[in-house]
Image (cartoon, rainbow, N blue to C red):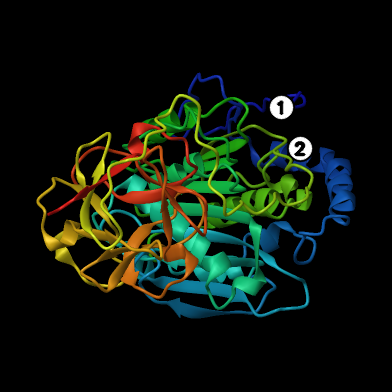
Amino acid sequence: MRGQAYHPPPPERTHAATAHPGRRGRLVKLAAAGVAAAVAGLLTMTVASGSASAADNPYQRGPDPTRSSVAAVNGPFANTSVAVPTGYGFNGGRIYYPTDTSQGTFGAIAISPGYTALFSVELAWMGPWLASHGFVVIGIETNSRNDFDTARGTQLLAALDYLTQQSPVRDRVDPNRLAVSGHSMGGGGALSAAIRRSSLKAVVGIAPYSPSSNLANDRVPTMVFAGQADTVVTPSYATGLYNSLPATTESAYLEVAGADHGFMVGRSNPVLIRTMLPFLKMFVDNDARYSQFLCPLADNSGVVSYRSTCPLLPTTPTTPPPTPSDTPPPTPSGTPTTPPTTGPPGTASLVVGAQSGRCLDVPNASRANGTRVQLWDCNRQANQQWTYTSTRQLRVYGDMCLDAAGSGNGAAVQIYGCHGQPNQQWTVNANGTISGVQSGRCLDVWSTANGAQVQLYDCHGQTNQRFTLTPVA
């Protein structure tokens, strides 16, 4: 039971949006200021109770919040940043983090820019803003500025894996409290990442464009922003996306008055700041002190419509899940048990997808560290010739290795100079899957088309994870 609904009278001035009659949550129409103040007074006891329970929360960071503090661009934590190089499954970026080391680890969020955009130009202001409120932030540049949503989602997951496993601030990050966000195609990428990695604590799509899927399989607490004047990702499109969420997924939707598609590009937006921060605090930090700002909406200025699954209370902190074993999962019943066709160690082979019939390929015959591998029509050129060695490496060009940029679901698979570490070692299994020694996860493709990028994912033995090593000679 989600509590008793409050239905305020309509405002004196009607801004555009009409409630979508979907089944999800409740619609909170804008109320007059006096009504909002009265509601806030009625909630005093509830807020006090939330603060009391937060005192026992090991993830709580920062002083008790106020309406002015959640609306502040500069929070209570001093922070700094460090550049991220390319070569980890995304095109580099920047990490922003609190300098305080006295409060333990912090939750983290990865952020992607929109189509053709750069994080450094579009959303860089979000880094110091969120870091000043007690989060570690990694803003990414994408491998291609034309990457679609699924590719951006893969890169966001690779960025989180880098942040928690390899980055210079990995000891400041709690790997079990992670979130993703993005604008436009980057927002669609964040939603794609959430669908693929349900262990994420929150996802925020800002005017998200998600051409590859709806949100029917999204189990991660989800926030969606729309702009009233956005003609690219219209409020109708954003509402439809929001309505596709399962009824059991905690969520919130805001339409920002007068906002176009770039309402947060290169500058902060007061509505986004005072609502996105509480959502992240509640679900990444399990901090119930922030529920007072969203349930109900404490400040409706600049908001056309607001919907949520209030009370939006986060789950009680639990013991982190065990680290995945390095041993690949058992072969599912019903999958082939005969070994795939392979040449002897040291033989150059094509790695051919069972589902697509296409080959594992290095785009444009690139030799650059961090180049993502893809599927492409088999042409037997050097950029498709892989040698499986006695040390379990898959080598291309003789000195470059197939390399996993992370170990989680969705981690990027790329080429990198051979160094012999476990993230460059692979097991060619009897059922045709190829699993990483470090992760235990399998090479996986989401599409059969030319250019489909390869990633890691939990082994299930379906045709999109099965490959044949066919000798070139």
At label 1, the amino acid type is: Tyr
Q: Dot 1 surroundings within 10 Å: few (below 14), some, or many (20 or more)?
A: few
Q: Dot 2 surroundings within 10 Å: few (below 14), some, or many (20 or more)?
A: some
Residue at image coords 73%, 43%: 314
Q: Which image quadrant is residue 85 in?
A: bottom left
Residue 380, position as x, y percentages in the image = 11, 53
Q: Give the quarter of the figure containing the N terminus.
A: top right
Q: Which image quadrant is residue 346 in?
A: bottom left
Number of the label disc, if any, that sits on residue 6: 1
Q: Give the quarter of the figure containing the C terminus.
A: bottom left
At label 2, the amino acid type is: Val
User: Extreme front residue here?
Assistant: 344
Is residue 165 depicted above or below 310 in this figure? Answer: below
The residue lying toward the viewer, choosing from 274 and 151, is 151
Residue at image coords 19%, 58%: 385
Front tag of 2 and 1: 1
Q: Is residue 381 left or right of residue 389?
A: left
Residue 18, position as x, y percentages in the image = 47, 26
Q: Which residue is mark 2?
A: 39
The mark nearer the N terminus, 2 or 1, is 1
Q: Is residue 33 left or right of residue 187?
A: right
- Please report contact status of discs 2 and 1: CB closer than 8 Å, yes or no: yes
Residue 407, position as x, y percentages in the image = 51, 57
Q: Dot 1 lies on which element?
A: loop
The residue lying toward the viewer, choosing from 420 and 142, is 420
Q: Dot 2 lies on which element?
A: helix
Residue at image coords 40%, 61%: 392
